[in-house]
């Protein structure tokens, strides 16, 4: 019989491990992995906990101490704390390449919320235009609205034609919405 080698428990050559602040029973690696640092109730040191994913795609695990499970902890938060120190107040953790499952310290950095949202927009991670869940218009309709307004058609008649509120038409024309097209 051969024992199947679980990738989560295998050692990656030259992997660096650091203790996670506030969770001294666990360590984070420079490969973005988590493992148990000390033996615990029913588990051994070096064990890699099973990761789960929340509804927005971030990996998390449930640290325990003394046999009691704690609150869920997102892996990127634990890795950033171990390698970059405590998160400064009011700062967010940014995945530089935009991949939420890439939790290597080199891919994580502390930024303001505004910087994080700007990068997400630049990488195309935020739903814009037709991809937004509350979009009522398409890019083609937006361009047609602007074209009809440029040819002196009233906003009220454009709104009636497309079945939207006049404020929606006004926002499109002024560039308050649909700025990207």
Image: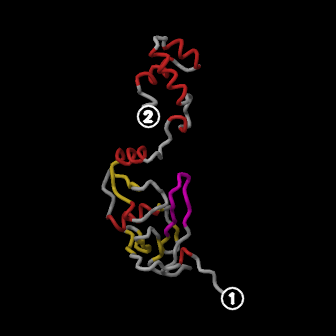
Q: Residue 22, position in %: x, y?
A: 38, 67
Quarter-of-image position of residue 51: bottom right
Quarter-of-image position of residue 7: bottom right
Q: Residue furthest right?
A: 1
In the rendered view, tell whether residue 160 sits above or below residue 2: above
Q: Judge by depth and name the residue closer to the eye, 149 or 115.
A: 149
Q: Judge by depth and name the residue closer to the eye, 157 or 83.
A: 157
Q: Which color scheme does this rendered protein use? A: secondary structure
Q: Secondary structure at mark 1?
A: loop
Q: Judge by depth and name the residue closer to the eye, 101 or 71.
A: 101
**In this picture, residue 103 sits left or right of residue 9:** left
Could you say which disc has been placed on residue 1 in the image?
1
- Which badge, 2 or 1, comes first in the chain's sequence? 1
Between marks 2 and 1, how big is the CA–CA gap? Answer: 60 Å
The residue pinned by badge 2 equals 180
Binning the other alpha carbons within 10 Å of mark 1 as few (below 14), some (14 to 19) or many (20 upward) gives few
| Magenta stretch bounds | 51-63
Q: Residue 39, position in %: x, y?
A: 48, 81
Which of discs 2 and 1 lies nearer the camera? The answer is: 2
In the rendered view, tell whether residue 41 sits above or below residue 58: below
Q: Residue 70, position in %: x, y?
A: 49, 65
Binning the other alpha carbons within 10 Å of mark 2 as few (below 14), some (14 to 19) or many (20 upward) gives few
Determine the residue positioned at 39% across, 47% down. 119
Instruction: Classify the position of the C terminus by image quarter.
Output: top left
Instruction: Classify the position of the N terminus by image quarter.
Output: bottom right
Determine the residue positioned at 58% across, 20% down. 162
Determine the residue positioned at 47% across, 77% down. 12
Asked if the magenta segment contains residue 139, the reply would be: no
Q: Residue furthest bottom?
A: 1
């Amino acid at each position: 019989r051969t024992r199947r080698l679980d990738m989560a428990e295998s050692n990656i050559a030259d992997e660096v491990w650091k203790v996670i602040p506030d969770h001294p029973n666990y360590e984070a690696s420079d490969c973005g992995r988590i493992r148990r640092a000390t033996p615990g109730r029913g588990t051994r040191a070096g064990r890699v906990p099973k990761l789960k994913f929340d509804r927005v795609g971030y990996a998390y695990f449930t640290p325990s101490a003394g046999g009691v499970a704690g609150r869920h902890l997102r892996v990127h938060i634990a890795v950033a704390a171990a390698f970059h120190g405590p998160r400064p107040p009011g700062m967010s953790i940014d995945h530089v390449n935009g991949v939420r499952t890439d939790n290597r310290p080199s891919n994580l950095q502390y930024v303001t919320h505004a910087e994080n949202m700007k990068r997400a927009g630049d990488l195309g991670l935020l739903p814009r235009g037709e991809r937004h869940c509350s979009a009522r218009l398409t890019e083609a309709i937006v361009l047609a609205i602007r074209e009809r307004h440029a040819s002196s058609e009233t906003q009220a008649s454009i709104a009636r034609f497309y079945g939207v509120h006049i404020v929606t038409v006004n926002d499109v024309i002024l560039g308050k919405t649909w700025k990207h097209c």
